[in-house]
Amino acid sequence: MKKIIISEEQVKKILDDILLEQVNKVSRQDFSRIQFKIEELENSLNDTIKEFKKLQESIPNGLKNPTNKKIMTISQYLIGAQGNIVALKSGVRAYKRKIYSTPIPQAAEV
C-alpha cells in the first residue's frame, strides 16, 4: 500500500474552503436587507431623539426638578443606543467586506 502524504498547505486550503463555504451562507441580498433595516432603525432613533429633545425643552420649570433624573437617564440610554447602532452598522459592513473580499494568494517561500 502506498503512503499518501498530506502537506500543511493542503490542510490549510481545505480548511479555508470549508470555512468560506460556511461563512458564505449569508447572501449579499441578506446583507443588504439587514443593512437597510439597520439604517431604518438608525433613522427612527434619530427621529425619536429629536422628539425627546422637544419634550425636554417643553417641560415647565415646576416639573424640571421631579423629572430631571428620569429625563437624564432616558437621554443617556438614547445616546448609548445610537452609539450601539453605529457600531453594529460598521461591524456588519466590515464583516461583509471581509467575507466577499477576494483573498490574495501568498507567494511561496523560497
Image (cartoon, rainbow, N blue to C red):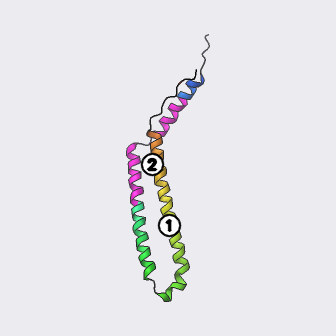
56 or 16: nearer the viewer: 56
Residue for point 38% across, 50% down = 33
Q: Specify the amino acid type for callout 1.
A: Ile
Name the mark on residue 45: none
- Crowdedness of circle 2 by 10 Å Cα count: few (<14), some, many (20+)? some
Q: Measuring from the top left, give residue 39's x and y in whole percent.
A: 40, 57
86 or 44: nearer the viewer: 86
| Quadrant of the rendering where the C terminus is positioned | top right
Q: Measuring from the top left, give residue 38's x and y in whole percent.
A: 42, 56
Question: Marks 1/2: CA distance?
Answer: 21 Å
Q: In the rendered view, tell whether residue 45 sits above or below residue 95.
A: below
| Residue 30: in magenta span | yes
Q: Measuring from the top left, give residue 32's x and y in whole percent.
A: 38, 48
Residue for point 40% across, 73% down = 51
| Secondary structure under the numbered disc 2 in the rendered image | helix
Magenta residues: mostly which secondary structure? helix
Q: Is residue 56 left or right of residue 29?
A: right
Q: Specify the amino acid type for callout 2.
A: Arg
| Residue 33: in magenta span | yes
Name the mark on residue 79: 1
| Secondary structure under the numbered disc 1 in the rendered image | helix
Q: Which residues are magenta?
A: 14-40
Question: Pointer 2: what residue?
Answer: 93
